[in-house]
Image (cartoon, grey):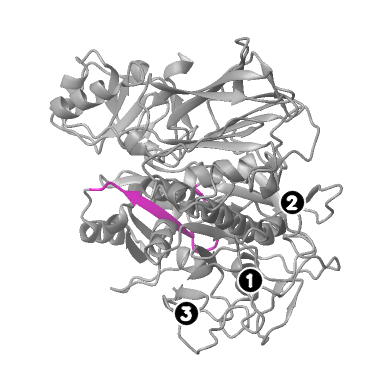
Amino acid sequence: MNSEFVVSIAGRRFDPLQAQSDDEPAARSPKAWIVQVTRPLTADQITRLRTTFGLRLTAYVPNLAYIERVSADTAMALRKDPAIRAVIRFEDGLSVSPEAPTTPTDDDDIAAFTILVFPDTDLDAARDALADLGGKLITVLDATVSGGEKSIRLNLDVHKLEAVGALPFVLWVEPVPTIVDDHSGVGTTLQPGTAGMIASIWEHGLHGEHQVIGILDNGPADLHHCFFIDGEGRPPGPDHRKIIQVRNANEQDPGSHATFVAGCAAGDDVGAPGSSPCRGGAYGAKLVLGNRRTLTIFDPSPAPMASTLFAELSAAHAAGAVIHSNSWHATPPGGGHATYDVTAADVDSFAWLNEDCLVLGSSGNSGEQQGPPGTAKNALCVSAATADPAAPSLGDGAPGLTADGRVKPDLMVVGCGVESALNGTTCRTGPRSACASSYATPLAAAAAALVRQYFLEGFHPTGFATPGDAFVPSGALLKAMLLHAAVPVETAAAYPSESTGWGLVRLAECLVFGAASPRRLQIWDLRNAAGLSTGQENAYMVEVLDGADRLKVTLAWTEPAPAVPGVGAATVNNLDLVVTSPDQTRYLGNVMVAGRSVSGGSPDVVNPVETVIIDAPAVGLWTVTVVATQVNVGNPGQGFALAVSGAIVAESSGGPGRT
């Protein structure tokens, strides 16, 4: 098989051209077709194929293929088009995850499954068809109102999986995952988790004011705790001091885990604002609280309590949350490296459609298996660092890589020795466990809130709050900035590291204040409306004034989910970072030795984050180029965020997000 054209779905690898049959019966149209193109499509080719054949070209499957619902006649006509390499049936066997149990695990042979259906599916008819196959507790979930998918959660005899996969409306079937979020053994190291990472930023008046963080946890926080209570007695809402919304359809009691992590993000003592040593990292921010138990419950009622992660993120966003913290992870069956599943796809689809948002997830605890939401492409996956500022190291967190080779975790934040709000108390704070990625994640979300406030108050590029320089940053820029702020904590030859990612976040590494420091920050933030199509590139000139400070460049982009979760590689669009020195030496993103960039190597085709780090850069003009190697699904193009720091000339960079 030609590896350039191999398609991998549901554990099966094949070349569509080799699988193509010249004798396709037009009378029996399948549920869908796999349409493979000869090379990445240009914007003009996409327009022509949509106009001529009615293709959507939004449901992408690596490599170079799309899933399309067209007639058999259209499929046969497509084969004659010069841009099309092969057209084959989307077979029934490609609809069932290889991680789905095919043999009974319990005496009653029943297991829980999530089913994704095609967008044009009649959900009532789908419910009836699944009931005919013995489906129980059939829970219909329609997130299309906010741009999401139609899906169904149910209990099913595992012997019926093949029959379910063959139903004409079924796109994908996978097991409902186990969700892990609690690590509660009491520890003894008692230090706040904000020192060194955030505290110096507070001194410049950035505490999270006018920022909203969404927390999805094992229940609501304890709203009677002084970190969250409103002094005027107002109920949760826009005028509440701290809590804008609580979504808790199944009336879960306040959780100790939820209370603690909400306090890490934005807790603040109502009686002594800004004074508690255990206050949240963005203690001036407000919170939107949700209950992640809705992601796994069954409720066939007309107004179901069950929900999807896409719907939960959308609801939080509708209430004002732009940064979304998740101190939990879904563990799919099978063990091993984290696979790409429905939960990961929900994150990526949400972030793709809501460019201002950033989603964060914990990497899990040491000894566990990583899983989404943190392992989604567009999410930041967070592990916990020790509290020792002199010699930080990994304190807690499951290592990567993901099953398709992406670096996870992305970074570390102090998650050891953390104290926060204790559930069931009036105002007590204290520890829950010695170290937990659960505590590092809301602190990372708090850091993102401070970075967002930095741009909204116009600190870039001068280092002084200047209303005329204020703009709304994209989620990709927030992600790029936190990664830009990360400093390596390991000297391993392989960097970024499989256990600590791009390193430990220290916001002072990337946020510039005043005029005293020679280090400056330059950013470019392009939304998809101004993004790149296949074959295009943007080049930016950066003038280095002094080689004494390192030059660091970070590229990040938010991209769509693949057509089905069970693909071999989740990458849809590939941008490449190329940094060229004054003497024309080229450095590619993520090509490093011992944490520093080296010339040569090959472009990274897996990670939606790329970094170049140069010690003692040559004085003069450097060129930073973003190359759109493949943009298989654009909206209409692929946007990106770019951060450059060093002893450089920094100017206002504008963009569609500017206020």
**Most distant residue in the front direction:** 515
Looking at the rendered structure, the kind of residue marked 2 is: Gly
Measuring from the top left, give residue 280's x and y in whole percent. Answer: 65, 67
Neighbours of disc 3 within 10 Å: few (<14), some (14-19), many (20+):
some
* Tag of residue 263: 1
How far apart, in angstroms, are the residues tagged by discs 2 and 1?
26 Å
Task: Answer with mark 2 or mark 1, whichever residue precedes in sequence.
Answer: 1
Horizontal side of residue 222 vs 95, given as left or right: right
Residue positioned 59% across, 24% down in the render:
543
Residue positioned 71% across, 75% down in the render:
276
Task: Answer with mark 1 or mark 3, whichever residue precedes in sequence.
Answer: 3
SS for dot 2: loop
Measuring from the top left, give residue 314's x and y in whole percent. Answer: 39, 59
As for residue 258 lying within the magenta part, the answer is no
Residue 189 can be seen in this image:
yes
SS for dot 1: helix
**Most distant residue in the bottom direction:** 233
Residue beneath disc 3: 240
Tag in front: 2 or 1: 1
Camera-nearest residue between 275 and 8 = 275
* Tag of residue 367: 2
Looking at the rendered structure, the kind of residue marked 1 is: Gly
